[in-house]
């Protein structure tokens, strides 16, 4: 990687914005960026608002008493209005001579809009490990911003979008995330996943970037799929196990099971390492078969997360999932027969969805549920950058990013209705479906029907517009914040 940093030590602050809950994922992207910067001789500081729930006022005090070259924050579109706009105002007011840089899935597809709304100086578009070093070189005067690939930036009232940077092809060349500068005690003890035992510590790991497919609701920052070597992956797992006691690894790839050959090589390398750990992985149904299930289970896989999405072939084709309903049922049956927990992910509200497809999705979940998680169904959201977002614009259902953020509240509510069902009836059907799933879950687990009723009532209030903070059965908000939602 080309290092263009001057001898003086540049100072970079990464702000991890609050998501108002106590179960926080380690921010792997910032971990990689921090390692790249530190390897280049920079000073990197982490301001973990997610873990410690620092307020914007506390951030103001911190920024006033420190000087930085770059102040960076990444975000997903779902948090833009709720968190990022106010956070940006604070950063801009207190940044002094620093450049305020935004990145990640949220700003990458709509950088000009994000720069106008937030007042940030720069948006990093796509993967930023290469971009971040060029930004430091520009800040220290060694490079003109107009020559930095992969960014959008402002100069006065003008906004410029530069040519994209090439994706990083050789992922093994990246240094491992700089875990030691993060609050690892909090990140390694706050999560509970299916199959975890008492005393297990869970942590995310990435074996690849990208996906072989392009579903219409998914925005991918880069094209194609790139793999780390299994030796590199297992080396990271071993370090995390020895240094932080990690015993449960959940793979955050878009697609871990991309081929049988990869699964076999990974399993062999993991056995050779002597690690005795538990795994949660992501898979597509067209690759997942009995042999893969047996191999994964033999090396500790207790959960496989699969985007089934729908039990309607018409809808699957609209999604461009490139699978069949029969493959969905086969994969679910295999996982259940092997006793591997299944992420029965179904959504509803795609073009072509109707009452029948919703009921079919519910029946599918009820049939194959192993009750590792409370399964519910969400309406599809056309986030900026995905094909469904542009379809909504073509159909006149959205006018652009401003309209999207005006209509988006959270991912359990309709942003755009792509069906022929009126909104009120849409919510009636969704409430009935999710009530069935919630009641079934509690009947087969704790039998705490009062808790089931309370959860169902939250959905009822959410769909009726009486509350907005509730984000579904598996991610209920746990921390009060200044909006008093």
Image (tube, rainbow, N blue to C red):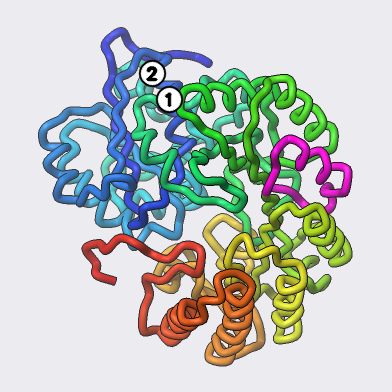
- Give whichever of 153, 284 is nearer the camera: 284
**What residue appears at the point 64 percent right and 21 percent down from the top-left corner?**
232
Q: In the figure, 33 relative to 214: above or below? A: above
Label 1: how many Cα within 10 Å (few below 14, some 14–19, many 20+): some
**CA–CA distance between discs 1 and 2?**
8 Å
Give the label on residue 303, or none: none
The residue beneath circle 2 is 38
**What residue appears at the point 60 percent right and 53 percent down from the top-left corner?**
194
Q: In the figure, 295 relative to 238: above or below? A: below
Whether the residues at callouts 1 and 2 have beta carbons within 8 Å, the answer is yes
Location of residue 325 in the rendering, given as x and y in whole percent from the top left corner: 84, 67
Location of residue 253 in the rendering, given as x and y in whole percent from the top left corner: 63, 42
- Give whichever of 15, 416 is nearer the camera: 15
The residue beneath circle 1 is 178
**What residue appears at the point 44 percent right and 31 percent down from the top-left corner?**
31
Per the rendered image, the range of residues in magenta is: 282-302
- Is residue 343 left or right of 468 when viewed as pictured? right
- Is residue 188 left or right of 81 when viewed as pictured? right
**What residue appears at the point 78 percent right and 66 percent down from the top-left corner?**
316
- In the rendered image, is residue 189 in sight? yes
Label 2: how many Cα within 10 Å (few below 14, some 14–19, many 20+): some
Q: Quadrant of residue 173?
A: top right
Quadrant holding the C terminus: bottom left
| Circle nearer the viewer, 1 or 2 | 1
Q: Earlier in the sequence, mark 1 or mark 2?
A: 2
Q: Secondary structure at mark 1?
A: loop
- Give whichever of 39, 186 is nearer the camera: 186
Location of residue 236 in the rendering, given as x and y in whole percent from the top left corner: 57, 24
Location of residue 450 in the rendering, given as x and y in whole percent from the top left corner: 46, 81
- Is residue 210 left or right of 133 when viewed as pictured? right
């Amino acid at each position: 990687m080309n290092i263009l940093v001057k001898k003086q030590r540049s100072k970079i602050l990464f702000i991890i914005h609050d998501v108002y809950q106590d179960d926080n994922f380690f921010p792997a992207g910032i971990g990689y960026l921090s390692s790249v910067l530190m390897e280049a001789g920079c000073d990197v500081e982490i301001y973990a608002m997610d873990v410690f729930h620092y307020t914007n006022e506390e951030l103001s005090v911190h920024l006033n008493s420190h000087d930085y070259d770059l102040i960076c924050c990444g975000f997903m579109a779902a948090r833009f209005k709720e968190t990022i706009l106010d956070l940006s105002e604070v950063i801009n007011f207190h940044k002094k001579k620093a450049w305020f840089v935004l990145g990640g899935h949220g700003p990458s597809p709509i950088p000009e809009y994000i720069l106008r709304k937030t007042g940030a100086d720069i948006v990093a578009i796509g993967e930023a490990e290469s971009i971040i070093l060029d930004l430091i070189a520009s800040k220290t005067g060694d490079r003109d911003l107009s020559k930095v690939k992969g960014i959008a930036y402002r100069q006065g009232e003008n906004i410029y979008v530069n040519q994209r940077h090439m994706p990083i092809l050789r992922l093994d060349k990246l240094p491992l995330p700089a875990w030691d500068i993060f609050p690892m005690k909090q990140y390694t003890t706050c999560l509970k996943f299916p199959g975890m035992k008492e005393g297990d510590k869970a942590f995310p790991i990435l074996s690849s970037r990208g996906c072989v497919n392009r579903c219409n609701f998914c925005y991918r920052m880069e094209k194609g799929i790139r793999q780390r070597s299994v030796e590199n992956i297992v080396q990271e797992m071993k370090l995390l196990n020895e240094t932080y006691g990690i015993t449960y690894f959940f793979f955050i790839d878009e697609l871990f099971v991309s081929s049988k050959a990869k699964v076999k090589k990974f399993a062999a390398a993991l056995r050779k390492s002597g690690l005795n750990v538990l795994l949660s992985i992501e898979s597509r149904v067209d690759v997942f078969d009995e042999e893969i299930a047996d191999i994964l289970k033999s090396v500790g896989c207790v959960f496989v997360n699969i985007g089934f999405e729908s039990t309607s072939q018409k809808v699957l084709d609209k999604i461009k999932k490139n699978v069949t309903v029969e493959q969905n049922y086969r994969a679910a049956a295999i996982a259940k027969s092997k006793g591997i927990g299944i992420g029965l992910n179904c959504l509803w509200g795609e073009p072509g969805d109707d009452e029948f497809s919703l009921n079919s999705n519910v029946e599918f979940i009820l049939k194959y549920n192993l009750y590792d998680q409370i399964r519910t169904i969400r309406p599809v959201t056309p986030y900026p950058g995905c094909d469904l977002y542009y379809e909504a614009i073509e159909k006149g259902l959205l006018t652009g990013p401003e309209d999207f953020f005006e209509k988006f509240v959270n991912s359990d509510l309709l942003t755009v209705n792509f069906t022929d069902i009126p909104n009120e009836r849409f919510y009636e059907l969704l409430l009935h479906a999710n009530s069935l799933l919630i009641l079934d879950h509690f009947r087969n687990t704790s039998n705490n029907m009062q808790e089931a009723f309370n959860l169902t009532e939250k959905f009822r209030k959410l769909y009726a517009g009486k509350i907005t903070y509730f984000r579904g059965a598996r991610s209920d908000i746990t921390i009060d914040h200044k909006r008093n939602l």
